Image: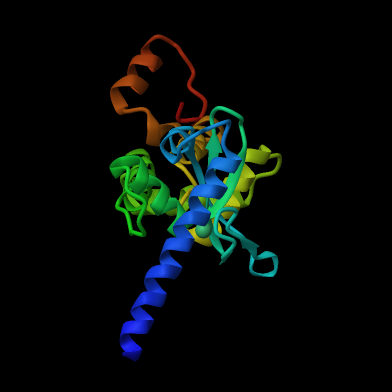
Amino acid sequence: MEIYENEVFTVMKEASHHVAFRKQLIAASAPAKTLEEAVSQWRFLCFVIFPKENLTRCQICNTSIVRAVAIRNEANETVLFIGEDCYDKLVHFAQTKRLESTRIRSRVLERKDIRNIFKDAFPRREDRQSFLGWFEAQDGIPETIRTSLQYVRIAKIAPSVEAARELVAYYNANRLMPADAILDYDIRSAAHKLGVVIPARITNS
Ligand SMILES: [Zn+2]
């Protein structure tokens, strides 16, 4: 009997959790009559980690969170910071039109896409390490890049595919490398024959 009551309690708790999810998300959306309409307005923005002294709460279910996902409403430009459980629920609903708690693969796949940006840009592991090390010594790094780097230091991954691409592009445009390491021998000797002087250190872009 006791077990039975606990089960009922769990089911009811779960249901009210979903009711709150539906209510909060619709309230934060541009006018939407149904959850389906509301969900279609939101897009993944980036992963976020809050410092321990600055814990925050999921803006949908109010649970304390350290790791969050920022989502942006394309219709009214609102940004919400929500926990990974609510994010999974949101994506699962977008895919299945069913409101239920779940662990989705899309968050895992998003991380895989981000990692692949670095792997494609720097196939050798030591290049990926020197890539991050290079930023440590730089002054005057733009704000968006600095924010991404802070995230990378804590989470060991960039907060989004866009942020990863931005980091790689900034690095390639600004890091001076030995020309010998970037240009192959044929190009260097052709330039030499034409009398073109290639600086000893150049960028990769
Ligand atoms: Zn939540």
Q: Residue furthest front?
A: 1
Residue 53 shows in the view = yes
Q: Is residue 4 above or below residue 163?
A: below
Name the residue rendered at 65%, 65% in the picture: 55
Name the residue rendered at 46%, 26% in the picture: 205
Model colouring: rainbow
Left/right of residue 29 with respect to residue 6 in the rendered view: right
Q: What is the quadrant of residue 161 in the picture?
A: top left
- Quarter of the image for the N terminus: give it: bottom left
- Number of labels in the image equals 0
Q: Is residue 105 above or below residue 166?
A: below
Q: Is residue 194 above or below residue 201?
A: above
Could you say where residue 71 lies in the image, as x and y percent from the top left?
A: 52, 42
Q: What is the quadrant of residue 146 in the picture?
A: top right
Name the residue rendered at 54%, 41% in the picture: 26
Could you say where residue 84 lies in the image, as x and y percent from the top left?
A: 46, 57
Q: What is the quadrant of residue 72 in the picture?
A: top right
Residue 177 shows in the view = no
Could you say where residue 22 lies in the image, as x and y percent from the top left?
A: 49, 48
